[in-house]
């Protein structure tokens, strides 16, 4: 869909599909959750690892791949403890729709997984081949939503409602 200077009308945005995606709630033994500071943002923009599902890839494999690509944590260091029952959607803010993912999607439709981390902090390496984070930390679950970019807060509240009870 052609856009003029990345601006899209509400009607154009509503015609766009959601990007198939996975999210990872990586919890350490204390029940704190991994968050990374996004490299492509000037202000605080912490988030849990997430990313697109490749063609022909199942969500479980996509979650483990995204975890590896964004944190350097291999699947040998985690166990899958839970996943969301369904998909959780969010819409991008209108001013970002024409810029993110080449203007092809209105937002993301995500399957979330709770992974238990069995390694040490030294096993985390955000200096990956294609880094997405400039910093990382473990957050208690009650601080998670307040530290996330505002347009993703409703998603994180849903993820915590489903998966947070198992932390």
Image: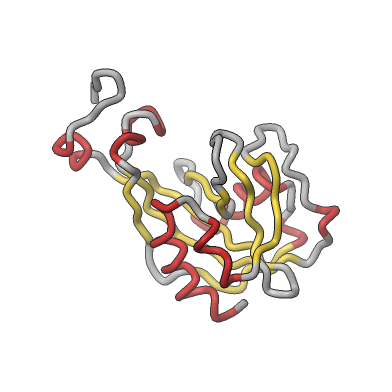
- Residue at 82% across, 57% down: 121
Q: Position of residue 94 (x, y in %)?
A: 28, 39
In this picture, residue 157 sits left or right of residue 106: right
In this picture, residue 59 sits left or right of residue 93: right
- Residue at 47% across, 67% down: 159
- For the N terminus, the image quarter is top left
Q: Which residue is situated farthest in the left direction here?
A: 11
Q: How is the image coloured?
A: secondary structure
Q: Position of residue 78 (x, y in %)?
A: 71, 64
In this picture, residue 84 sits left or right of residue 93: right
Residue 25 figure quarter: bottom right
- Residue at 59% across, 41% down: 38
Q: Nearer the viewer, residue 29 or 77?
A: 29
Residue 166 figure quarter: bottom right
In this picture, residue 20 sits left or right of residue 137: left
Q: Position of residue 34 (x, y in %)?
A: 66, 59
Give the vertical position of 115 relative to 13 (above or below).
below
- Residue at 54% across, 75% down: 164
- For the C terminus, the image quarter is bottom right
Q: Position of residue 156 (x, y in %)?
A: 46, 63
Q: Nearer the viewer, residue 61 or 105?
A: 105
Give the vertical position of 160 relative to 149 (above or below).
below
Q: Which residue is situated farthest in the front direction here?
A: 43
Residue 27 figure quarter: bottom right
Q: Which residue is situated farthest in the bottom direction here?
A: 165
Give the vertical position of 108 relative to 103 (above or below).
below
Q: Nearer the viewer, residue 93 or 72?
A: 93
Counting labels gives 0
């Amino acid at each position: 869909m052609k856009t003029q200077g990345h601006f899209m009308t509400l009607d154009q945005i509503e015609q766009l599909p959601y990007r198939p995606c996975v999210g990872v709630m990586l919890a350490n033994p204390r029940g704190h959750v991994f968050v990374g500071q996004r490299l492509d943002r000037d202000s605080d923009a912490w988030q849990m690892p997430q990313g697109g599902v490749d063609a022909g890839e199942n969500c479980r494999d996509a979650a483990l791949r995204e975890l590896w690509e964004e944190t350097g944590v291999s699947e040998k260091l985690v166990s899958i403890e839970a996943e969301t029952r369904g998909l959780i959607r969010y819409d991008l803010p209108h001013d970002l729709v024409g810029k993110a993912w080449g203007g092809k999607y209105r937002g993301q439709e995500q399957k979330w997984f709770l992974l238990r981390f069995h390694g040490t902090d030294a096993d985390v390496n955000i200096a990956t081949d294609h880094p997405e984070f400039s910093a990382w930390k473990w957050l208690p679950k009650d601080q998670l939503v307040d530290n996330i970019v505002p347009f993703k807060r409703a998603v994180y509240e849903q993820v915590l409602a489903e998966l947070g009870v198992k932390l």
